[in-house]
Amino acid sequence: MASLTDRVRGNGRIAAGLLLNLLASICIVFLNKWIYVHYGFPNMSLTLVHFVVTWLGLYVCQKLDIFAPKSLPPSKLLLLALSFCGFVVFTNLSLQNNTIGTYQLAKAMTTPVIIVIQTLCYKKTFSIKIQLTLIPITLGVILNSYYDVKFNFLGMVFAALGVLVTSLYQVWVGAKQHELQVNSMQLLYYQAPMSSAMLLVAVPFFEPVFGEGGIFGPWSVSALLMVLLSGVIAFMVNLSIYWIIGNTSPVTCLQIYVEFELL
């Protein structure tokens, strides 16, 4: 009876984490699209804001004793931090250059790509049932891309890069949590500032920093509030996805999302 109760509680926590991540992900998609369309805030700069707010949120959490930081070697997190940058930048570029429908459908390809990566690189096996679900997902994405009346080649390139980097990132998140024996907050606490530093160096080469259109440009109060709100929601997305992957697996997480979207 005790084990059954513990299992129900565990499944309840996972369901709550999935629901939080789903709601936050939906909010940030529409909010970021609004920011791009109505304010023209630069993509990489918005990503940098997300990373900084995520780290500040975790700093507050550790000061409140919600988790205890664990010392980690930076060399072990370098590729993860780099993939985090690519994951957010390319998915935001995909959102910026595609319709929301195309953007969301392209994300569904993350499941097949994760399965390919885990099969080829980690020698994992998956049931026939899981493999068969990849056929309608892949066909649906291809047909939508082919018949999309607002087809954007550059947008599809960004979407493809986003799917590849996101898949690598989510596989590595799970692997690093188990390899380093850390929880979601401990890992993200060290990885978020590393990613912020990488983007801080890269932003001046691709986007203006000061003046019109720069991160420190003359933005309206409403624009700054929307960007800050986007950062807070990004913190919720990042933290919840780390927690979900650490307590399940990338494929389990994505399976649930795909099933939800097909209903």
Image (tube, rainbow, N blue to C red):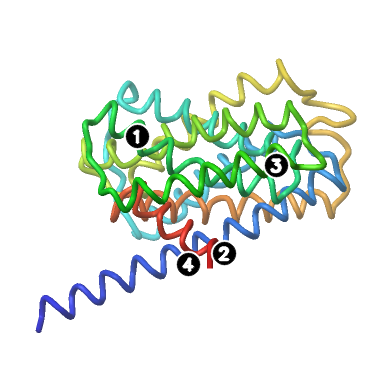
Residue 151, percent from left and from top: 77, 36
The residue that label 4 is drawn on is 19
Q: Residue at x 10, y 80 (%)?
A: 2
**Which residue was labeled with disc 3?**
95
Of mark 4 and mark 3, the one earlier in the sequence is 4
Q: Position of residue 30 (x, y in %)?
A: 72, 55
Question: For the point 57% across and 64% down, which residue is it?
Answer: 23
**Residue type, numbered disc 1:** Trp
Label 3: which secondary element = helix
Please give the residue where the numbered disc 1 appears in the rendered image. 172
Res 146 → quadrant = top right
Amino acid under disc 3: Leu
* Front disc: 1 or 3: 3
| Label 4: which secondary element | helix
Q: Position of residue 155 (x, y in %)?
A: 72, 32
- Is the residue marked by circle 4 packed among few (<14), some (14-19), or many (20+) residues within 10 Å? some
Residue at 31%, 53% (x, y): give it.
Answer: 129
Q: Earlier in the sequence, mark 1 or mark 3?
A: 3
Amino acid on which disc 4 is placed: Leu
Circle 1: element type: helix
Q: Is residue 20 above or below residue 168?
A: below
Query: At numbered mark 2, what does the secondary structure look like: helix, strand or loop?
Result: helix
Q: Mark number for residue 10?
A: none
The residue to which callout 2 is attached is 23
Q: Is 80 drawn above or below residue 253 in the view shown?
A: above
